[in-house]
């Protein structure tokens, strides 16, 4: 098992363009999470999936953001009409469990710069 | 929502020194994780600790859930310990609420 994998590692885009990030969780992990981290801050929760169902979305996830996990395996996070304020590290995590507490493991992140 | 506060925000140590990082949280939690964020941004798991004490080499952690705090101890610090340490409380569904982090710098 190679852990959680994210692609790309870095992305520079012009304002107004669309971008898509991919996350491959640890195999057999049924839960997948997206977080965003800006400079000097702790990561903030965006959304999570249990299998293919998106169970919770943060208020941070504006209508320009959409996430999918079509077959309950990998996930994509798309940002439409990017803005400079979207510049951040986007982190993906996965865990195995049902119910409350399960240990999460993170990928290396995708660093987005909007110019 | 739940508040997670870490202290101190910054810490500078001489190599070989010991340190204690603190994490306070404002409500009951299902579990708690400690992470070390490396210079490339990846979060490395240190401890998954709902209560009690765990040890892993020079690091140990103690969570007192009834008093809503957790402590991370680093003994005989090394320069490779430098970086940002985060605690995160685990909510229903496994969602993590992070503190603001403690930035540790260990000088040779």
Image (cartoon, helix red, strand yellow):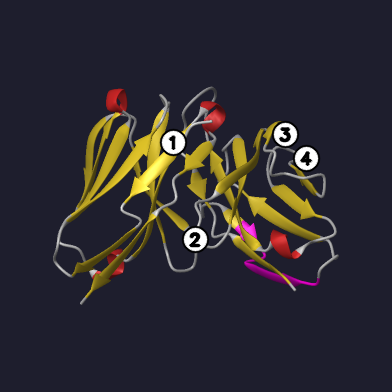
Residue, disc 1: B89
Q: Which residue is rendered at x = 75% and y = 74% of the image?
A: A115
Residue, disc 4: A70
Secondary structure mostly seen in magenta is: strand
Res A16 → quadrant: bottom right
Q: Give the letter of the chain under mark 3.
A: A
Secondary element at image label 1: strand
Tag 3 and tag 4 share a subunit: yes
Q: Read off the magenta span.
A: A6-14
Q: Give the letter of the chain under mark 2.
A: A
Mark 1–mark 3 Cα distance, whole angstroms, equals 24 Å
Q: Which residue is rendered at x = 31% and y = 27% of the image?
A: B65
Badge 1 density bin: few <14, some 14–19, many ≥20, Cα 10 Å: many
Residue, disc 2: A40
Secondary element at image label 2: loop
Residue, disc 3: A52
Tag 4 and tag 1 share a subunit: no
Asked if the residue under mark 4 is in contact with the one under mark 3, i.e. CB atoms within 8 Å, the reply is yes
């Amino acid at each position: 098992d190679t852990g959680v994998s994210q692609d790309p590692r870095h992305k520079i885009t012009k304002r107004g363009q669309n971008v898509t990030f991919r996350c491959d969780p640890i195999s057999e992990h049924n839960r997948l999470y997206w977080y965003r981290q800006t400079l000097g801050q702790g990561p903030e929760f965006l959304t999570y999936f249990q299998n293919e169902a998106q169970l919770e979305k943060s208020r941070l996830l504006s209508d320009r953001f959409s996430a999918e996990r079509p077959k309950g395996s990998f996930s994509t996070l798309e940002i439409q009409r990017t803005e400079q304020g979207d510049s951040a590290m986007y982190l993906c995590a996965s865990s195995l469990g049902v119910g409350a507490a399960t240990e999460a493991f993170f990928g290396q992140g995708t660093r987005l710069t909007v110019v | 929502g739940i508040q997670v506060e870490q202290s101190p925000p910054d810490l500078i140590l001489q190599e070989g020194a010991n340190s204690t990082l603190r994490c306070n949280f404002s409500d009951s939690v299902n579990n708690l994780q400690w992470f070390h964020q490396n210079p490339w941004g990846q979060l490395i798991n240190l401890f998954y600790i709902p209560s009690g004490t765990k040890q892993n080499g020079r690091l140990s952690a103690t969570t007192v859930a009834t008093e809503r705090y957790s402590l991370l101890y680093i003994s005989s610090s090394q320069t490779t310990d430098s970086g940002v340490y985060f605690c995160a409380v685990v909510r229903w569904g496994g969602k993590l609420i992070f503190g603001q982090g403690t930035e540790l710098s260990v000088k040779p």
